[in-house]
Image (cartoon, grey):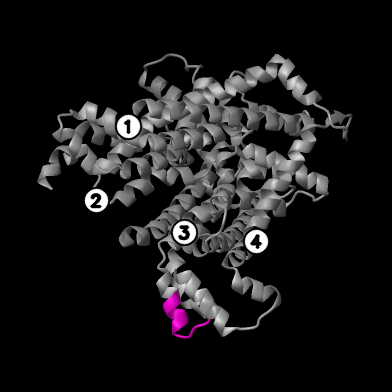
Amino acid sequence: MSDLSYIKRPNRPLQIYAILFLVVLYLPVLFIPLFSFNDSVYVKFPLTGLTTKWYVELWSREPVWNALWNSVKVGAAVAVISTILGVIAARAITRYRLPGKNVLVTFIMMPLVIPGIIFGVALLILMSRLGVPLSLFTVTLGHLIVCLPFAVATLLPRFEGFDKSMEEASADLGENGWWTFWRVTMPMVFPGIVASLLLSFTISFDEFIMAFFLTGTDPTLPMYIWGQLRFPQEFPSILALSALILFVSFFVVFVAQYFGRRGLESEQ
Amino acid sequence: MTETSSSSTKAQRSPGRGGLSGLLHRHENLRGFLLMTPTLLVMGVGIIAPFFILVTMSLWTRQGFDFDTTLTMANYARTWNEPIYGALLSRSFWISGIATVATVILCYPMAYFVAFHVHRNKMMWIILMTLPFWTSYLLRVFAWKVILGYEGVINSGLMAVGLIEAPLEFLLYSQEAVIITLAHAWAAFAILPLYVSLEKIDKSLLEAATDLGDGPVARFMRITLPLSLPGVIAACFLIFIPTTGDYITPALLGGPDGAMIGNFIQLQFGPVNNWPMGATLSMVLMMWISLIALVFLFITRLAREKIA
């Protein structure tokens, strides 16, 4: 340890930079909950007083509840489907020596490096040419494309760090393929599956670009917010709604990340 | 090794199987592909089919409320000849380029700090740095509107303290506002690849450099920076490409000077209602991105050969 000290020596300026970095990273988002409790329609300093009326008012809004329900439905469907597809893909990629494996992985990861708007308009054109009316189903398809790369990226390391001899041992002891999967494979990759479910859900829940092009008459929550942004008098209620969404997202993602990385770190 | 042995035992266990199942038992690869089929199918429906129809439509033209489906390059010619499109594209690339460079430069020390100076709870730091990224993009952009607005946090704050008399108007609806917001919103895309490439660096190389008389600066320039270049390149791609097509940030914060190609594409599918033109613009955007990416890769490869 001591001979490494000149490299590992704490670097004071860098520490200060790191803390500043985190402050700047979080500060902008923190203004949203701050002003959501402010007793004024105008979003500005000085703060005029503490109130929860924006939250109370939000509670009685029918469209908010509808949008929330739409987002939850889409998010749940996207989470389950993209995780199942992700498990299948990760399993196939790691278990078999597929020729052209890298091409397949690159293909699945492609949505990460193509502007979302291009996927949005392309799917919109496809749906309209096929005569499929825009609905929550089209939004779900769009979100699947966005979430699959993240699901696969979350699940792949799990399956890669997986010791194949465990499955073989199970097979040797007489389990068939199906039970081996449920009793050996599944418990080992389970944290990855939880992480993938939670991440896909949040990404879908917060996704806007695809939803913008593919939403029919039922808006998702971000679409509802976008619609309300035109009206300055709605700002405080939108702030309250945003604060709630941020809080839930932060919580869910934190749990997802914790699950997703914990096992991996300890194995290494 | 193990795979072949396990598959041969299975083959022995079920001798004389014919047809598809026999074929699958004999060829592991086929089973793998079969397992992948659902995923590939969804990606095919979601990526390949839309892409083909996008290409096709970009060759159509608008005819009243309908499309003229004769294939023509007319739209492409328009984007080439009318200066507005070139101007919008170059502005988009300019804004995204500045935002990308700013993000990578600002995130590098942070990633460096976590990779080299954090020894406990590394995972906590990584989660902390990337957490905001997973929350709604729309809301993060909205937060910047609250901050930079005419009566926003900065203006009203400065006025309340008495530092300024009237609100600063240049804050909102400007290219700078778009650049700041993009750099802030995409930080996680820089942090992760930078961190991964820095973390991988063999620390003994740094010791060797120090033993051979390199100071901290020389050590950084000759070892850390070159070895982290793949992370820098990945970060640049991951930020530059998606941000060029962004339209939420410019729509909320850009104003007329900050409008980007994404806003124009969106207009074609909305109020302007010229879908073929929108498809053409999407194609042109993708082609330029690919071209820029290739040139960028070429330059970095040259640079790396120079260093090595």
Q: Which residue is mark 1?
A: B225
Q: Check residue A261 for magenta coloring.
A: no
Query: Which chain does tag 2 point to?
Result: B
- Is label 3 in a helix, a strand or a loop? helix
Secondary structure, mark 4, is helix
Which residue is found at the position 44% from the left and 30% from the top?
B301
Q: Are marks 4 and 3 on the same chain?
A: no
Instruction: Measure the C-alpha gap from mark 1 to mark 4.
Output: 42 Å
In the image, which residues are magenta? A168-176
Q: Is residue A174 magenta?
A: yes
Nearer to us: label 2 or label 1? 1
Q: Is residue A216 left or right of residue B11?
A: right
Residue marked by disc 4: B37
**Subunit bearing disc 3:** A
Q: Nearer the viewer, residue A111 or B132?
A: A111
Q: Which residue is mark 2?
A: B120
Label 2 to label 4, Cα distance in Å? 42 Å
Q: Is residue B48 left or right of residue A55?
A: right
Going by the image, does B119 lie left or right of B183?
A: left
Residue ID at (71%, 39%): A121
Judge if badges 2 and 1 mark residues of a common chain: yes
